[in-house]
Amino acid sequence: MADKNTYRDKFPKKNPDGTNIIDLESHKFIKVWQGPQHPGITGNMSLELILQGDEVMECKTHVGYLHRGFEKLMERRRFIQNFPLCVRIAVPEPDFNEYCYAATIEELAGIKVPEAGEWMRTLILEMSRLTSFLMHMGGQAGAFGLGVVAQWNNYVRDLMLDRFEEISGGRIYRMHMPPGGVRGLTPDGFEGRMEETLREIEATMKDVDKTMFNNAIFKRRTVGLGYIDPAMVDEYGVTGPNARAAGIPKDVRKDYPYLKYPELDFDVITATESDVYTRTDLRRKEILLSVDLIRQIMAKMPKKGEYMAKMPNVLHWKIPKGETYVRAECTRGEYGYYTVTDGSGYPRRVNVRGPSYTHAVALMERLAIDCNIADTAGLMLSLHTYPPEIER
Amino acid sequence: MKALLKDLKKRFEISKVVQQRPDEVFVTVKKDDAVALITHLKTQEGFTHLVLLTAVDWIEDGKFQLTYLLNNNSDKQDIGIRVMLDRQDPVMESIHHLWKQAVTYQRELKEMFGIDFPNSPRIDEPFILEGWKDIPPYRRDFDTKQYSEDTYFPRPGRETHDPSEYMKKKLYPEE
């Protein structure tokens, strides 16, 4: 009996550099576009996949569906006008943009944010991290068919958005940290309502733990999927939970303490298995850590006091020539702003360093190879990427 | 940081050293030395993390400034390396052999600033813009306002007011 595989080579031939030789004309391969309109893609981007059977042989990331030229627009606007613009770069967690932008401007202009303002900023960043992780975990569960986790998480996330609304009046774009400080402190009775929300989140996370992390199907599909080697961390620019799940304790909150993080008590969470399951589990622990940090901040932060530095007339505000880079730990890794000023009333250049830039392009193109087509969505989501910060 | 800078000054021709923060320094290096310096920092000094690679357009001097920001996570230091390129002939050596993600940065710079990195993989593939015919859009001489006026048609009911004028009225009415 003839070998079943004689009419079709089991594996494609390789180039000298180890990449697959893909000959679409041979009809052994099929090209599939996953995205830009696809539920298994984060936001609007697309993966150009070349498959043999149901295995991915080659993956190329395509972005550009959301390009609005933020960095270019910022060069035409005054420093204060850029503030409501920069939040739009990462929709589920805009506060990191606010903080990084404000911090670069304050550093270059020599402005010192008052104590209460710094505490308030820390609180907002932690709340933002929590909401973003909750949303992400819903998406991650959804990619493996556990839609109910997404519903639960979005419910508790909504409660957190109510707290944001109390503080700033905004639910999605809070815009609470203009250069110089914050727009206000917490309202009366905020602590009690926050504590209620945190308890609700903790209860939900217990349910999520049972339904998701002890679910046989979820485990079967995610354990061993999308392994990131610790050696790849620097080579591919991996940061944040993706790096920590590979055992590299990289956390900007600890390594380069900013705002009030040095006064908070926490340890960097790491793991070693570095697959999709571990990364998701690490993010669950991060959610609980955020809950703990918010409690610590609420206990320590001053309830009144100066929260905004004295600012010059922002319409004629000129900042001396200089350049700087400020980073913060967002949910996905290192988020940073590189701002160059030239002495005029407008920035010369603002460059946004989003962690998705490396995760979704170079790393994803590498990890997708030999992955099953059905797992690509889950793999993509486990890297936690937001396309707008790739194309800015 | 001081010892490192002293050592680097011995090996390379670095100038315009700006100590921005105790853990962050910016230096300028000649174009031909840049990749050697970056390789030295990565392999010998522990600057193993490429934070970002971007360009600044100094159109009045006829220069592009490339900024490589490297990070040493064990000593918690950052070094920004500026390389000045001639605006008329913006070509730079590629660093894709040092970091895989550099490919993406270089593709973006080629598209947005027109800075070429010969031999970098997929350098000519469009990254964000498809079928772009105009000058690279992130250069200072590309006028975004003019572009949108030429490309998009005005619709009734979409008049905008100048934000500066509005803010002046709201924030500083007495001026």
Image: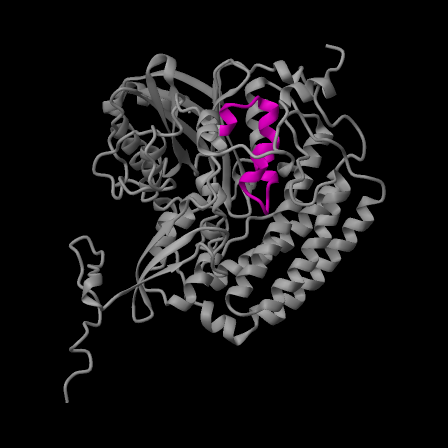
Give how far across and how far down residue A258 sits, in percent: 59, 34
Q: Principal SS element in the magenta part? A: helix
Give how far across and how far down residue B170 sits, in percent: 73, 21
Q: Does the segment drawn in magenta span residue A82?
A: yes
Say left or right for A34 vs B123: right
User: Residue placed at 77% from the left, 43% from the top?
Assistant: A166
Above or below, B44 against A275 in this view is above
Q: Which image quadrant for residue A380?
A: bottom left
User: Residue placed at 58% from the left, 33% from the top?
Assistant: A85
Say left or right for A61 vs A28: right
Q: Which image quadrant for residue B39?
A: top left
Task: Work out whether residue A166 can be spotted.
Answer: yes
Magenta range is A73-99
Q: Camera-side residue: A26 or A197?
A: A26
Above or below, B38 against A48 in this view is above
> Colour scheme of this structure image?
one colour
Give how far across and how far down residue A355 sits, in percent: 46, 44
Above or below, A345 against B136 in this view is above
Task: Work out whether residue A273 can be spotted.
Answer: no
User: Residue placed at 53% from the left, 61% from the top?
Assistant: A140
Q: Residue furthest front?
A: B156
Q: Residue furthest right?
A: A188
Q: Does the segment drawn in magenta span residue A117?
A: no
Say left or right for A58 vs B142: left
- The quadrant of the rendering that contains the N terminus of chain B is top left
